[in-house]
Amino acid sequence: MCGITARVGPGEAVPELLSGLENLEYRGYDSAGIATRNGRGIDLVKREGEIDELRGAIEKRPPQGSVGVGHTRWSTHGPPSDANAHPHADCTGQVAVVHNGIIDNHERLRAELDSHEFTSETDTEVVPHLIEEYLSDGDSPGEAFRRAIDRLSGSYAIAAVFDSTDTVFGSRNGSPLVLGRASDRYYLASDVPAFLEYTDEVVYLEDGDVVALSPDGYTITDAGGKQVDREIETVDWEPADVGKGGYDHYMLKEIHEQPAALRQTIRGRTDLLAGRAELEEFPPESFSDVDVVHLVAMGTSYHAALYAQSLFASRGVAAQTFLSGEYATNPPSVDEETLVVAVSQSGETADTLAAIRSIHGTGARTLAVTNVVGSTLTRECEDTIYIRAGPEIGVAATKSFSSQVATLSLLCERVSQDTDGATPTATSELFESLAALPDHVQQVLDESDAETVASTYRNSDSYFFIGRGVGHAVALEGALKFKEITYDHAEGFSAAELKHGPLALVTESTPVFAISVDPEDTKTLHNVKEVRARGAPVVAVAPEGSTNLAAYADHLLELPKTHPDVAGILANVQLQLVSYHAADQLSRPIDKPRNLAKSVTVE
Ligand code: F6R
């Protein structure tokens, strides 16, 4: 939800700000803007639309200067328009501000600032006008910025450029802000890809921090105004990881990156001889006190969590999955024996952070399962396991689902062994399947018939996805992906639920994708016969050897033979390809679906 960036150093700021915004566009893409300090004042250009619109405007009138801020927007207050695009300036043009988040007390502040001329409907615009007030009191830019920040409540990552200084100021509270340090220049951004081309040295700022970046260095002060040192970390992502690498879309690139991502996820985390998961921070017995597991997540991560719930259940570990957005408002009871696992690709999803915050102080143990090093979730939870999928830029989550499920299945092994000791034979079969998973995913990518399936059913009214157990989680995820990028109606159900209502909607123009992870699965076969009897075309997504299911299906998207706990990941890859090709045939903007943004940092 909105990406911000800032840059100080030698040379012109605009090219680096623009490339930073392009790498943050997954966070929002309804308008964008840049402001620089040109030595005489502030140059500010902003436009409704994607960054190409901004680029066009900049070519006509390039902002000058080596210091600046940039923004790409996902609207919360006020529709997409040139006026509502960031940066926002004060009445005198002394300061320009970019913001990600929501300022809860903006109405009260706006009323207080009634002598100022507001030009947008945004919550953000109160910030430059507050700064203007404090500058007129005689404050320095740094003092005025700090005083303004201290007046805000809500969530924010903010950066401000002033006409009077080559220092850029930034602050965060509840929204991500990372500092990048290169040899002769500094950056601020909502996420590392914004400046990865220029540096891999980062400082993850903490809530309440105010940072002052000048060409000579930076200082950080904490919420109390005390100067602090924050650790400089090196990220192990390559600049090429954030490009499209020759693919038409990030989504397709990320689908094809799954074999490599899964190798990274699993690497060093299984001990085949001992038949156990080796999660670096969690030696055996780490979870022996766990009585119940709660999984909290949203969207695709929620589906990965539901998948894991089935795995926990099949090992006799009590586990329940919650939409994080419900967890905080309807809290279930938890105690010291509850392990709360927060699953989030970005580690910045506001609902999931709220769920974790809601149980602080209860004694429940919290564990983040995330992709993004240093994300807020890793700081809110006691422990973290990284899924190591590499940067995911496409708004539709793909490789993160596979890596989340693989990570959660290892966690599930660890917890079940610690709590009641799984049999080594069952475990080693699973580990062998996990070890083969990257190659099996590659096989699916090489041999999939998904493009033909997508084109066969491209004129259908509606698409249904059914499955049981892990197949239910995959059905929900398949439908989410399909609706998200094709804009066609798609629903996922438990195959068990079909006869209890949804069957009423099944006609000859509702293709049904039936997901099965077991060639002997007779229940899904019965459900397939039921929908066939109503004239619906059936696409079976099932392992080699599912002859019965194949006999009743119009198409088979086949999965290599593997452990059923892992087969769902392969089925999901088939469905990712179906969604991708369906959306591509409809010429949808696959990486930037309407109304969505990758990182949902507001509740
Ligand atoms: C769907 C999608 C979203 C996210 C959801 C949670 O393709 O990307 O549904 O899965 O917003 O995001 P994270 O995993 O970052 O918490």
Image (spheres, helix red, strand yellow):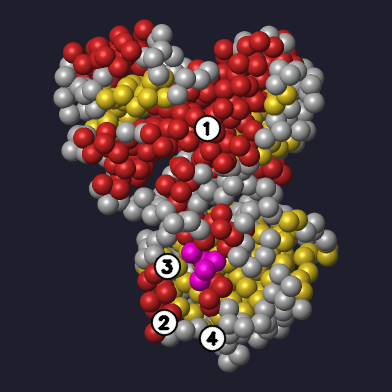
Q: Amino acid at mark 2?
A: Glu
Q: Residue furthest bottom?
A: 40
Residue at mark 1: C-beta within 8 A of ligand 1: no
Mark drawn on residue 59: 2
Gap in angstroms between the C-alphas marked 1 and 4: 51 Å
Q: Residues within 10 Å of mark 4 (few under 14, many from 20)?
A: many
Residue shown at 26%/36% (left/top)? 452
Q: Main secondary structure of the magenta part?
A: helix
Residue shown at 48%/23% (left/top)? 567
Q: Disc 4 or 3, which lies upstream in sequence?
A: 3
Residue shown at 58%/67% (left/top)? 5
Query: Any magenta on residue 360?
Result: no
Q: Is residue 76 left or right of residue 422?
A: left
Gap in angstroms between the C-alphas marked 2 and 4: 12 Å
Q: Disc 1 or 4, which lies upstream in sequence?
A: 4
- Place residue 578 in its image quadrant: top left
Q: Which residues are magenta?
A: 18-22
Residue bearing mark 4: 64
